[in-house]
Image: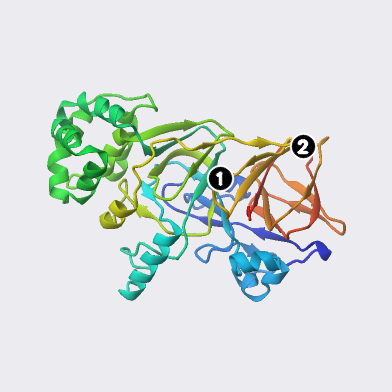
Amino acid sequence: MEIIGRDAIWKIKGCVQNYPWGGKSYIPDLICEANEEDLPFAELWFGQHPVCPSMTTTGSSLDELMAVMPELILTAAEQNTWGNQLPFLCKILDVKSMLSIQIHPTKEQAMAGFEQEEAEGIPMTAPHRTFRDRNHKPELMFALSEFYLLHNFRSDSEIRLLLSNISELRSIYEVFIERGLDEFYRWLMDLDQATINQLLGPFVEELRSGKVFDDMTSPEYWINQAIDQYCTADKIDRGILSFYLMNIVRLQPGEVIFQDSGIPHAYLRGQNVEIMASSDNVIRGGLTSKFINSSALSNLVRFDSRSIFRLTAEVGEDGRRTFSPPVEEFRLSVINLTPSNPFELQVPSVSLLFSTCNCFKVASPTQDIRVGGGEALLVRAGSMVKLRSRGAAQIFIVQGQR
């Protein structure tokens, strides 16, 4: 681990996750790796989560350093609040194939669920383990490209309109009219697979009868993709109905959306920067071959708000755009650097700096540090740094809000 003068700045390298839904060129190009094995590169993590911790310049993990010397990185006030942990986890995602529908628990729900599964003796690596830590996982995502996702439920009137026009889903429509969204969704998640196949089989058969759907804002376009990705001859994924139940959102580069606890969502396609509380708690609701804990899903999913939670930036006099979600673990600032426009930054709390385009340099009173693709800088609270770049570069700054 490299300690740079009294400013306490650390250079770290991100950790790659090769999930099968990832693309094969975006992240390898970013980190200057050839990808000779033609692997999917889904996520690049910056943080200390033990599943995929960032590495230091001396070869130890950031998690190991924080366990031994947290006072070098966190102030006394931050240690009092966060313990010896960074409150946030940062990721760069390349979504080529859609991810599962999921929700995340509140902190209280996560603590209760974790303790219950510990008492039941469920191994941490068991496929039916739901709560892998005691933390919540609110998420902010910044679109790097045109990005599609499912996000929160549609209004009842919109769901009724969509379902009423599909004769093969008439029985589904009638249950929705009778029960309303909350009871209908819980009923759908609890159905056995044979009943799902019986109810959705005629619909899937009709949809696959040669029709071509090329409108990426239509449910049928994505349902076709989901059938290819997740459905087999003897198992229709119940999640395909979610394209009628949930909003299909298209984001342009630079737009930001926030997903709080209990809000169902699924990433469909594109690249983004994702900031979250440091957690790996995921409750799935379809579009997956993994375990669906229908009981936890029914108890934790929210139906009270049907809004699309876009975040608007506060723009400072220096041009910095700051997105502040209603959580204390993180906020995101974005700076656009040009060769003629260096940027001076005083960090009020522990901060992580990284970019997705070109390299940039960070100067402290004692050092000048080059940050390349796949690298980030961890900066202790109170440090003053100057950012500059030879080309246009978008710099992301993540820090706690407390």
Q: Which residue is mark 1?
A: 325
Residue 382 coordinates in the image, percent (x, y): 77, 58
Quarter of the image for the C terminus: give it.
bottom right
Residue at image point 84% right, 58% down? 367
Q: Is residue 258 left or right of residue 226?
A: right
Which residue is nearer to you in this view: 26 or 291?
Answer: 291
Whole-percent x and y of residue 90? Answer: 57, 52
Q: Position of residue 236 (x, y in %)?
A: 21, 44
Residue 227 in sight in this render: no
Q: Residues within 10 Å of mark 1 (few under 14, many from 20)?
A: many
> For the residue marked with disc 1, what is the amino acid?
Pro
Q: Secondary structure at mark 1?
A: loop
Residue 207: x and y, percent?
Answer: 22, 29
In this rendering, the label closer to the viewer, 1 or 2:
1
Mark identifier at residue 318: 2
Residue at screen point 32% across, 30% down: 219
At label 2, the amino acid type is Asp
**Relative to 203, is 277 above or below?**
below
The quarter holding residue 149 reads: top left
Mark number, residue 315: none
Q: Secondary structure at mark 2?
A: loop
Which residue is more in the foreground, 20 or 258? 258
Tell me the quarter of the picture where residue 328 sits: bottom right
Regarding residue 178, the answer to whether it shows in the image is yes
Nearer-N-terminus badge (1/2): 2
Q: Relative to 84, does residue 336 appear above or below in the rendering?
A: above
Q: Nearer the viewer, residue 265 or 45?
A: 265
Left or right relative to 333: residue 129:
left
